[in-house]
Image: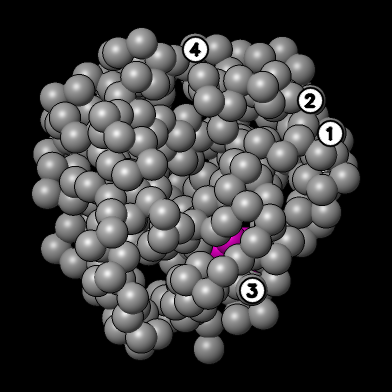
């Protein structure tokens, strides 16, 4: 894994760019997001989003990958201007989260047949404001029928386009089941990104995930996951020592207004002002370069579509 070839492209809200130009990348975050599971904490303010991007850029950040899928207030209409005005590259997501995250009306509208769901994903990937990843959410130690349908459609869309599939693992669980679902449906491991791996800090489990060849995205500091945040550096150290440094990514996963740096949380800048420093002290500057720059080049590059 590691750096992509020079001809590889990443699809941003402003169009395709060479993947090698992504620079320091926040591999999993949210500028705009709303969920019935987080009432009153909606990320729906473009002004606050712009301020967050400005702070991220001031800390050295160059790209933010937003994992908000359709139906959860992803803000496709405002993302291009946020990217242009801040100078930060933004990659948006198509896909579908766990049913619980969609408002009740949205769950009814999203109960569609397999072909229509696939068509929605593909349409988003080639829309006037295009998406550059396919995001799917799965449950706690379990994949239900809604989630399995999402994974199947995501796999077909990935095979058709070469786009990566990014998966929300609830508390980091069911990762091996997710990998099996996607790879058995033809998605190469290098096009699979598992999110929230650090929320299940079992070294043997993380090693098993890494052995499949998929990318593992860890979260930066958050109030909700403070109990496992401290395991981040040691988890990355163990995986790097086992030869999996080229599979590691890091994201802020800012899902509430209170978590933004412009409110009361660490937000996006903390990935670079705090977390990256801790990783560098433990693993060295070359590891930070790999996790924040080199690995995202391949993770978010569109690969040659599968035959």
Residue 88, percent from left and from top: 28, 33
Task: Give, as a single range, the part of the protein colored magenta.
Answer: 189-193
CA distance for labels 3 and 4: 37 Å
Residue matched to label 2:
234
Q: Secondary structure at mark 3?
A: helix
User: Sequence-wise, which precedes: disc 3 or disc 4?
Assistant: 3
The colouring scheme, among rainbow, by chain, secondary structure or one colour, is: one colour
Q: Are marks 2 and 3 in contact (CB under 8 Å)?
A: no
Q: Quadrant of residue 275?
A: top right
Quadrant of the frame with the N terminus? bottom right
- Tell whether 211 sits left or right of 182: right
Packing grade of label 3 (10 A; few <14, some 14-19, many >=20) is some
From the viewer's side, name the closer residue of 299 and 147. Answer: 147
Residue matched to label 1:
238
User: Sequence-wise, which precedes: disc 4 or disc 1?
Assistant: 1
Packing grade of label 1 (10 A; few <14, some 14-19, many >=20) is some
- Asked if residue 289 is positioned above or below residue 52 in the image, the reply reads below
Residue 241, percent from left and from top: 86, 35
Which one is in front in this view, the residue at disc 2 or the one at disc 3? Answer: 3
**Is residue 21 in view from this perspective?**
no
Q: Which mark is residue 181?
A: 3
Q: Are marks 2 and 1 in contact (CB under 8 Å)?
A: yes
CA distance for labels 4 and 2: 19 Å
Packing grade of label 2 (10 A; few <14, some 14-19, many >=20) is some
Magenta span includes 304: no
User: Sequence-wise, which precedes: disc 4 or disc 2?
Assistant: 2
Q: Are marks 4 and 1 in contact (CB under 8 Å)?
A: no
Residue matched to label 4:
273
Which one is in front in this view, the residue at disc 3 or the one at disc 4? Answer: 3
């Amino acid at each position: 894994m590691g750096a992509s070839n020079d001809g590889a492209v990443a699809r941003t809200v402003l169009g395709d760019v060479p993947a090698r130009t992504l620079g320091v990348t926040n591999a999993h975050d949210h500028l705009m997001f709303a969920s019935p599971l987080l009432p009153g904490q909606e990320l729906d303010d473009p002004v606050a989003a712009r301020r967050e991007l400005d702070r991220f850029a001031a800390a050295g950040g160059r790209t933010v990958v937003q994992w908000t899928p359709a139906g959860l207030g992803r803000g496709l209409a405002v993302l291009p201007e946020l990217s242009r005005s801040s100078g930060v590259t933004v990659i948006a997501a198509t896909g579908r989260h766990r049913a619980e995250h969609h408002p009740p009306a949205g769950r009814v509208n999203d109960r569609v047949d397999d072909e229509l769901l696939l068509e929605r994903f593909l349409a988003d990937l080639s829309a006037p404001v295009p998406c550059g990843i396919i995001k799917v959410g799965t449950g706690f130690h379990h994949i239900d029928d809604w989630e399995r349908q999402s994974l199947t459609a995501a796999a077909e869309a990935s095979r058709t386009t070469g786009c990566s599939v990014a998966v929300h693992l609830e508390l980091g669980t069911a990762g091996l089941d997710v990998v099996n679902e996607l790879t058995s449906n033809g998605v190469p491991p290098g096009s699979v990104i598992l999110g929230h791996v650090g929320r299940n800090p079992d070294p043997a489990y993380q090693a098993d995930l890494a052995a499949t060849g998929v990318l593992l995205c860890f979260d930066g500091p958050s109030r909700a996951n403070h109990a496992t945040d401290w395991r981040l550096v040691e988890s990355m150290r163990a995986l790097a020592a086992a030869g999996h440094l080229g599979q590691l990514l890091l994201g802020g996963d800012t899902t509430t207004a209170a978590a933004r740096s412009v409110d009361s949380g660490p937000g996006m800048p903390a990935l670079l002002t705090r977390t990256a420093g801790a990783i560098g002290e433990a693993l060295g500057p070359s590891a930070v370069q790999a996790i924040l720059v080199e690995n995202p080049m391949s993770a978010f590059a569109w690969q040659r579509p599968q035959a």
